[in-house]
Image (cartoon, rainbow, N blue to C red):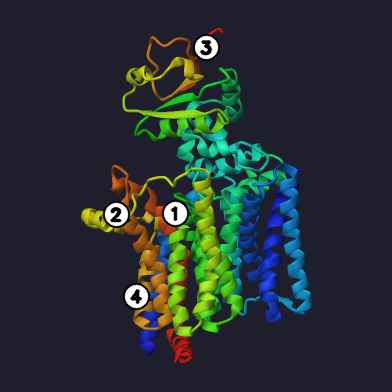
């Protein structure tokens, strides 16, 4: 009975020590990395947009830019398929452009010639390219930051 | 002002939950203050989010905030009245030995550290784009998610069909702070952690009869890398840790009810289980597991009616949310096809891959360290004990994992293996605290508890 007790204690001690030994470096790193703050309203959005595009205060600047677009029509956002950064940036653009309707289009190639053919320019407010190269023939481009380009669609005169 | 608002929001959540918890426990004559505070947060977040959702259908803005605040305060007053009428008194569990004091201090220190650490990180991908986004859109629309959000096909990536438990808890803090402050809103996740750690200690101590076992497992809880580091940990604002805390609480009180047949144990079980599907869609599976276990328990106890009544709130929430989505013409998205026998037969060849991915994940040291090894040894102990209660606890850890894994038989992703690899680490988090309870029970002396429960059954 006593041997069973010692075996029980020994087994659990070994398991807990092994667990703590393996966990400590991983958890320790997570605890130590980054620093507190900054205490900002749009802390998460700004941090991601800055990291992905270099744009400071993206949560304010991007919606401000989109506000100058035509009042009607969705924003078409092109992202690279199977590219997590591009997709995430596209989703962030979709997030901050609320309440404007958005459409996320995943493209398999670095250019979007084929996908653009299907878009009626009269029905959209603008095109956003996230880590995707806009075709050279496309009109006015606004480089919003690294890896993000806006092509506003000018509203036809009444 | 922002911090004042934040405290106001947190206070009202606690007030509502405390009122409900007090009215449950006051009739015992003694109210465990730690237990009551823990349940106050769980109940409070559920009450506030449900009230925001329901009241948001007929009012908005300041009126909505005022209505929900008054309801919270009314619940607090009601609870206090019940306490006064029952002449109940608060008790604070005090550690009995220096070891327990040391372990308690470690648990408190870890909660404080995680509170600090969570403010060093941003919200993660899902935390931001699946959950917080709903709180923000509702905030800018006077506290109500606009109908256009649900119909926006371009924002389907934010999963409008996901339940609103956590987003509306975040919304509540936004309403009180007066702005959608992504920094301070993260406070709710370490609060869920702290509540989870305290409940783990309390419930394990109660079930094992050894306070040190509860405190020991609670002190090791944050050393599971998935809790404090990604994926799905509390620092990135995912809902998986909160869901796991609700599961832990529901499971713990179900077992307490099995032991003491006390109505005051089945009510917290009913409340926590009901909130599972309100936190995350997978909560439906966890709720089903608990109801199934509860049904078996109730057959032993000849108290099936109590169990059936306690499962009604969960059923109401599940059906209510489904109806609401149907009313908004939202169909739960199609990561999974409708299960059928023919599809099951067709996809049975996936089983070896699914088992292989699951096993690979369980032994992934960056996510779990050796946690699942400890859990596996504990489950062997529990099964070997041949004690009904312990076998059921082991089942409560294993069954959700099996069911979660089986769902990938019906995955509609082009690559079901990619689907599983991307989501299974977070799903395993849901049963992780329950796994710690199993470890706590295996750690403590097996003989005495077995005899006690078996004599009750006999």
What residue is shown at x 47% (from left), y 33% (from top)? B154
Q: Residues within 10 Å of mark 2 (few under 14, many from 20)?
A: many
Report in which chain the residue with disc 3 lies: A
Mark 4 to mark 1: distance in Å?
28 Å
Pick the quarter of the image with the C terminus of chain B: bottom left
Query: In what element is the residue under mark 4?
Result: helix
- The image quadrant that residue B89 belongs to is bottom right
Same chain check for tags 1 and 2: no
Q: Pick whichever of labels 3 and 1 is earlier in the sequence.
A: 1
**Nearer the observer, B332 or A91:** B332
Compute the Cα span from label 4 to label 2: 27 Å
Q: Is residue B10 above or below residue B207?
A: above
State which mark lies toward you, 4 or 2. Answer: 2
User: Which chain's residue wears label 1?
Assistant: A
Q: Secondary structure at mark 3?
A: loop
Mark seen at residue B200: none
**Residue identifier under label 1:** A25
Q: Which residue is mark 2?
A: B409
Relative image position of residue B275 (x, y in whole percent): 55, 60
Task: Return the disc, 4 or 2, that comes first in the chain's sequence.
Answer: 4
* Residues tagged by mark 3 and mark 1 found on one chain of the structure: yes
Chain ID of residue with mark 2:
B
Q: Is residue B195 visible?
A: yes
Q: Which mark is residue A154?
A: 3
Which chain is disc 4 placed on?
B
Measuring from the top left, give residue A66's x and y in whole percent: 56, 22
Q: Which residue is the site of mark 4?
A: B380
Q: Secondary structure at mark 2?
A: helix
Residue at x 50% of width, y 24% of height: A74
Q: CA distance from mark 3 to mark 4?
A: 69 Å
* Picture quarter with the N terminus of chain B: top right
Instruction: Report the number of numbered marks.
Output: 4
């Amino acid at each position: 009975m006593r041997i069973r007790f010692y075996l029980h204690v020994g087994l659990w001690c070994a398991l807990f020590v092994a667990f703590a030994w393996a966990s400590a470096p991983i958890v320790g790193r997570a605890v130590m990395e980054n620093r507190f703050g900054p205490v900002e309203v749009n802390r998460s959005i700004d941090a991601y947009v800055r990291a992905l595009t270099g744009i400071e205060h993206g949560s304010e600047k991007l919606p401000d830019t989109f506000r100058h677009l035509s009042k009607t029509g969705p924003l078409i956002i092109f992202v690279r398929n199977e590219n997590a950064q591009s997709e995430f940036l596209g989703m962030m653009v979709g997030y901050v452009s609320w309440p404007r309707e958005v459409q996320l289009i995943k493209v398999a190639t670095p250019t979007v010639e084929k996908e653009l053919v299907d878009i009626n320019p009269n029905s959209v407010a603008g095109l956003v390219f996230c880590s995707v190269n806009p075709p050279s023939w496309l009109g006015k481009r606004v480089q919003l930051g690294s890896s993000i380009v806006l092509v506003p669609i000018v509203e036809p005169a009444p | 002002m922002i911090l004042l608002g934040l405290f106001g929001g947190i206070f009202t959540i606690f007030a509502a939950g405390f009122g409900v918890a007090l009215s449950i426990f006051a009739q015992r004559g003694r109210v465990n203050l730690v237990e009551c505070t823990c349940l106050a947060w769980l109940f409070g977040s559920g009450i506030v989010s449900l009230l925001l959702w329901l009241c948001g259908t007929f009012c908005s803005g300041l009126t909505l905030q005022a209505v929900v605040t008054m309801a919270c305060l009314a619940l607090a007053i009601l609870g206090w009245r019940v306490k006064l009428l029952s002449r109940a008194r608060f008790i604070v569990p005090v550690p009995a030995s220096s070891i327990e004091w040391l372990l308690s201090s470690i648990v408190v220190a870890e909660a404080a550290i995680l509170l600090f650490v969570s403010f060093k990180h941003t919200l993660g991908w899902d935390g931001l784009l699946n959950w917080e986004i709903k709180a923000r859109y509702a905030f800018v629309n006077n506290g109500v998610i606009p109908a256009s959000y649900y119909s926006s096909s371009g924002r389907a990536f934010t999963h409008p069909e996901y339940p609103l438990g956590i987003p509306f808890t975040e919304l509540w803090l936004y309403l009180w702070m007066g702005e959608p402050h992504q920094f301070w809103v993260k406070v709710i996740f370490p609060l869920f952690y702290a509540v989870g750690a305290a409940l783990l200690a309390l419930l394990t101590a109660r079930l094992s009869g050894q306070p040190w076992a509860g405190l020991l497992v609670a002190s090791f809880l944050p050393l599971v890398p998935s809790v404090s580091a990604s994926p799905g940990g509390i620092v990135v604002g995912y809902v998986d840790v909160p869901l796991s805390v609700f599961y832990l609480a529901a499971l713990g009180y179900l077992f307490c009810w099995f032991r003491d047949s006390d109505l005051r144990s089945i009510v917290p079980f009913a409340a926590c289980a009901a909130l599972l599907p309100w936190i995350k869609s997978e909560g439906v599976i966890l709720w089903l597991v608990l109801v199934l276990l509860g049904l078996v328990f109730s057959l032993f106890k000849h108290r099936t009616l109590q169990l059936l009544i306690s499962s009604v709130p969960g059923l109401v929430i599940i059906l209510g949310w489904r109806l609401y989505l149907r009313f908004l013409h939202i169909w739960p998205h199609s990561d999974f096809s409708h299960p059928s026998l023919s599809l099951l037969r067709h996809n049975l060849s996936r089983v070896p891959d699914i088992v292989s991915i699951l096993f690979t994940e369980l032994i992934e040291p960056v996510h779990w360290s050796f946690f699942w090894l400890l859990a596996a040894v504990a489950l062997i102990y529990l099964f070997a004990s041949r004690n009904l209660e312990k076998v059921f606890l082991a089942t409560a850890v294993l069954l959700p994992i099996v069911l979660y894994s089986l769902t990938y038989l019906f995955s509609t992703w082009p690559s079901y293996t990619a689907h599983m690899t991307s989501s299974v680490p977070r799903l395993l988090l849901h049963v992780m605290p329950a796994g710690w309870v199993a470890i706590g029970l295996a750690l403590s002396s097996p003989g005495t508890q077995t005899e006690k429960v078996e004599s009750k059954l006999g």
